[in-house]
């Protein structure tokens, strides 16, 4: 099956192989080396102050969001949630479920948040945190998180900036540092692993803000993780996979990786436009990892996806208000131009102008890389 999904994403052979490593005692002499290697590689990837500023939990991405809320905030804390789509809304729902007092900024689907508007909402208010989405997977929008972080840096007594980058890092680089306090990531998107691990990277301030005691939290207490312990049985096989994946991530390097995803995005957009579909997000803030495309009224997204599956390709449907006439093509994680080309070839016969679509994909690849596909 070819998958062009915003998660789960294809798994490289090296990662699959590593996950077949035999079980051993996670407190024995074999596993701790993997534990240390992963903590160190993640700290480097996120530019975290030390390996003790990173926690890997057995959960899908949402578990990571919940862990961030449980560790930094108590019921009644006032936070600002910036919602640019379904996942921004979800982050707010997690906060609400924990009794936080929410203010929301709701952005029109398909648009990023505006930094000045967020800053305006902060002036005069005393929020303990701001919850934002880096790469909004439901719409395919890349939000100006780094810019917001830089602006906040100048403010004294600023709120904690907590970022859901589950479909962003490491495909789209993002670092904690002085400005971003917590980044949440998931194993099944840019990290090229199966679902099941949530990762949190914390700044110095983020780590200091972890609550020592907090009603309603037990399993996701980050304190033991941040002290270098594994309090409960880790998802051992996934750790082996993550270790191998992080080696691949380091080998490729963040610049080359972002360039690869940006190229994939540009190919998808050119292909779609020529083939009779409409990209829903303006190029200047279009995500490098997922692209939402409006279908002509004659094509039903669920029938289309069913047909494609029969031919060996899975793409994603759309959510919320875009459910009835939009598809999403994922190009996150271990997807290269060849993989994309194979998928777009399977999709082409369903489009109004299949040949134009494929020609535009070839031309774009050629223009940007000087080579023909794949
Ligand atoms: C996928 C995703 C999530 C949810 O992650 P799960 O692994 O399904 O729990 C949350 N936020 C964003 C931005 C995502 O892309």
Image (tube, rainbow, N blue to C red):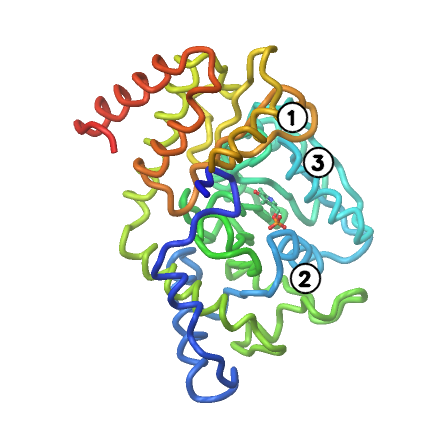
Q: Which residue is mark 1?
A: 107
Quadrant in the picture for the C terminus? top left
Q: Who's the residue at 49% across and 48% down the image?
A: 189
Q: Is residue 326 visible?
A: yes
What is the number of the mark on residue 45? none
What is the number of the mark on residue 71? 2
Position in image of residue 162 (x %, y %): 59, 49
Classify mark 1: helix, strand or loop.
Answer: loop
Which label sits in the foreground, 2 or 3?
Answer: 2
Position in image of residue 74 (x %, y %): 77, 58
Position in image of residue 239 (x %, y %): 48, 68
Classify mark 3: helix, strand or loop.
Answer: loop
Q: Who's the residue at 34% across and 54% down the image?
A: 249
Which label sits in the foreground, 1 or 3?
Answer: 1
Q: Who's the residue at 47% across and 53% down the image?
A: 176
Out of 48 and 2, give the one closest to the viewer: 2
Q: Who's the residue at 47% across and 11% down the image?
A: 352
Classify mark 2: helix, strand or loop.
Answer: helix
Q: Is residue 143 visible?
A: no
Earlier-in-chain disc, 1 versus 3: 1
Disc 1 to disc 3, how far (Cα)?
Answer: 21 Å
What is the number of the mark on residue 124? 3
Out of 74 and 333, give the one closest to the viewer: 333
Disc 2 to disc 3, how far (Cα)?
Answer: 25 Å
Earlier-in-chain disc, 2 versus 3: 2
Position in image of residue 100 (x %, y %): 79, 49
Out of 117 and 57, give the one closest to the viewer: 57
Asked whether disc 1 touches disc 2, contact meaning CB atoms under 8 Å apart, the reply is: no
Out of 301 and 69, give the one closest to the viewer: 301
Residue reaching furthest front? 310
357 w.r.t. 132: above or below: above
Q: Residues within 10 Å of mark 3 (few under 14, many from 20)?
A: few
């Amino acid at each position: 099956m070819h998958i062009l999904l915003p998660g789960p994403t294809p798994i490289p052979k090296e990662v699959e192989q590593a996950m077949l490593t035999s079980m051993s005692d996670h407190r024995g002499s074999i596993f701790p080396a993997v534990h240390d290697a992963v903590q160190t590689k993640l700290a480097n990837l996120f530019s975290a102050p030390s390996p003790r500023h990173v926690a890997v939990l057995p959960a899908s991405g949402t578990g990571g969001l919940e862990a961030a809320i449980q560790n930094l905030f108590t019921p009644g804390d006032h936070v600002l949630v910036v919602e640019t789509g379904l996942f921004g809304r979800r982050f707010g729902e997690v906060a609400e479920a924990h009794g936080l007092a929410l203010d929301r900024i709701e952005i029109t689907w398909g648009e990023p948040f505006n930094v000045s508007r967020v800053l305006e909402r902060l002036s005069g208010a005393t929020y303990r945190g701001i919850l934002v989405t880096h790469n909004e997977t439901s719409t395919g929008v890349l939000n100006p998180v780094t810019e917001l972080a830089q602006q906040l840096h100048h403010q004294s007594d600023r709120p904690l900036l907590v970022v859901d980058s589950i479909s962003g890092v490491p495909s789209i680089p993002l670092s904690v540092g002085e400005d971003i306090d917590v980044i949440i990531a998931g194993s099944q998107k840019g990290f090229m692993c199966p679902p099941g691990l949530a990762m949190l990277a914390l700044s110095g301030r983020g780590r200091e803000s972890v609550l020592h005691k907090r009603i309603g939290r037990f399993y996701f207490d980050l304190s033991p993780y941040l002290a270098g312990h594994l309090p409960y049985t880790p998802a051992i096989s996934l750790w082996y996979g993550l270790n191998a994946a992080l080696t691949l991530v380091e080998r490729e390097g963040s610049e080359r990786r972002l360039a690869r995803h940006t190229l994939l995005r540009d190919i998808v957009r050119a292909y779609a436009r020529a083939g009779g579909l409409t990209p829903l997000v303006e190029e200047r803030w279009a995500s490098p990892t997922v692209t939402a495309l409006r279908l002509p009224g004659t094509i039903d997204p669920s029938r289309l996806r069913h047909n494609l599956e029969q031919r060996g390709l899975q793409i994603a449907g759309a959510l919320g208000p875009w459910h009835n006439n939009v598809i999403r093509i994922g190009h996150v994680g271990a997807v290269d131009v060849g993989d994309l080309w194979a998928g777009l070839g399977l999709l082409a016969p369903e489009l109004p102008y299949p040949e134009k679509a494929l020609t535009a994909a070839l031309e774009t690849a050629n223009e940007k890389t000087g080579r023909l596909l794949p």
